[in-house]
Image (cartoon, rainbow, N blue to C red):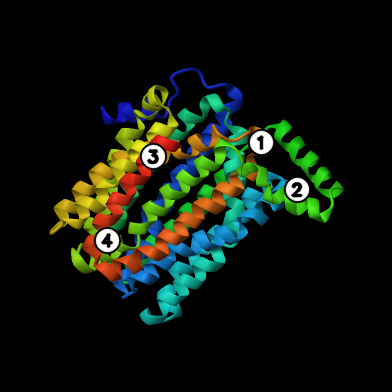
Amino acid sequence: MIFTRIRQSLRPGRQLPEDLRHNFIHLLLDIGWYGVLNATTMTFLTIYATRIHARADQIGLISAIPALMTMLFALPAGAYLKKRSLSKSAIRLGIVHRSFYFLLVLLPFIANQQKQVSIILLITVIMFIPYSAFSMAFNALFGATVPIEWRGYYAGARNALFAIVTIIVSLLSGFLLETLTFPLGYQIVFGMGFVGALMSQYHIARLRVPPDEANQQIKDGINEIRISMAARIKNSLRIDVLKGPFLRILLVLTLFHFTQFLALPLFPVFYVNELKLSDQIISLGTAIFYVTMFIGSMQHSRIVSRFGNRWAVGAGMILLAAYPAILSQATNAGFYLAANVISGFAWSLSGTALFNYLLENIPAESRPAYLAWFSLLANFGVLSGSLLGPVVGNWIGIVPALVLFAVFRAAAGTAILRWG
């Protein structure tokens, strides 16, 4: 039964055109290998940092630094990409960014535990300098290679495979961390993440960009040479993007990211210091999250067809409020596992629909400018939430903070449904 559903989720309900099949395969393999990275380094880096005695504010910085780097480089990245090939930029910048994951494997050889937290922060700063342009290039590349009528299916299939890989690899990671000595287990898990990152990048490099998209890149480059320096600055900022209904969408999505990231720095500290969860239990919770996310993603196209992407993002965010709410009452691993059941379903709604919701409100001919503003404001929400969350947690206590952040998440989802 489950394997039948997996095959159905990865197959379209209608014939996939031949010219889309090549990109479909590589977009699937890209997200599959990214699932390896997600189930290893991205899941366990903050857990590792907590186990070597990182403070909540330092955990917050690990989440905040990527957002800060993206904010600083979002608008320059938009101008940079305007006069360059999207595909070549996605390949080169992605390789530079993802190569730094290998340094995490070497951490125990580089310094003692006290200095390792600072090194993790430094690596995070450097590796996310090229990330803003890479992320925008890939998002624009996805929009250029996937016709709008196929985006819902592509997103659903990618999320399904991402969930399957994450489930399997997260359980394997938990087994390795429980079986091997510390820190060897983390080094092997981080090494798996590095391999996953590079293999994902390989499949991004295999994507075929339509000729008209390549021609558009050439035209943009010629236009860039003709305009004056003042006009270049104005063109990269594109203040006109902030006029009209898109500004309202930007604001509610900024609130979405802010309220989501308020609680994230507190979770690893609560898992390790309060609930005393083992790595195996944490990996089991991750697997449960992606099991329910996978089940939900199989119904994603049907739900979006009936209610729309905005409803999916808003309703999913309201459901995501259950995670910190349940965790705040947790006294054992059972509460943690139950919270992951609900949040997996919630993320199958909001996480899958978010980018499609954004794309359906962006003119195709101006994607880089609109995505630059979204990246800037969304990462402002991530940055401010990641930094403010530990402050509030230290001020009122971690349990009351989790309750408060649950209320904020529900309010953000309501705002999307009402004003998005």
What secondary structure is marked by label 1? Answer: loop
- The residue pinned by badge 2 equals 83
- The residue pinned by badge 1 equals 209
Type of residue at label 4?
Ala
Which is nearer the N-term, disc 1 or disc 2? 2
Marks 4/3 in contact by CB < 8 Å: the verdict is: no
Which is nearer the N-term, disc 4 or disc 3? 3
Which is nearer the N-term, disc 4 or disc 2? 2
Task: State the separation of the CA atoms marked 4 and 2.
Answer: 45 Å
Task: State the separation of the CA atoms marked 4 and 3.
Answer: 23 Å
Type of residue at label 2?
Lys
Image depth: mark 1 or mark 4 in front: 4
Is 335 situated left or right of 167 in this image?
A: left
* Quadrant containing the N terminus in the rendered view: top left
- The residue pinned by badge 4 equals 401
Residue at the right extreme of this rendering? 226
* Quadrant containing the C terminus in the rendered view: top left
Image point 16% across, 56% down: which residue?
330
Q: Is 357 or 174 nearer to us in this picture?
A: 357
Which is nearer the N-term, disc 3 or disc 2? 2
- The residue pinned by badge 3 equals 350
Type of residue at label 1?
Val
The image shows residue 90 at horizontal and vertical percentages of 62, 49
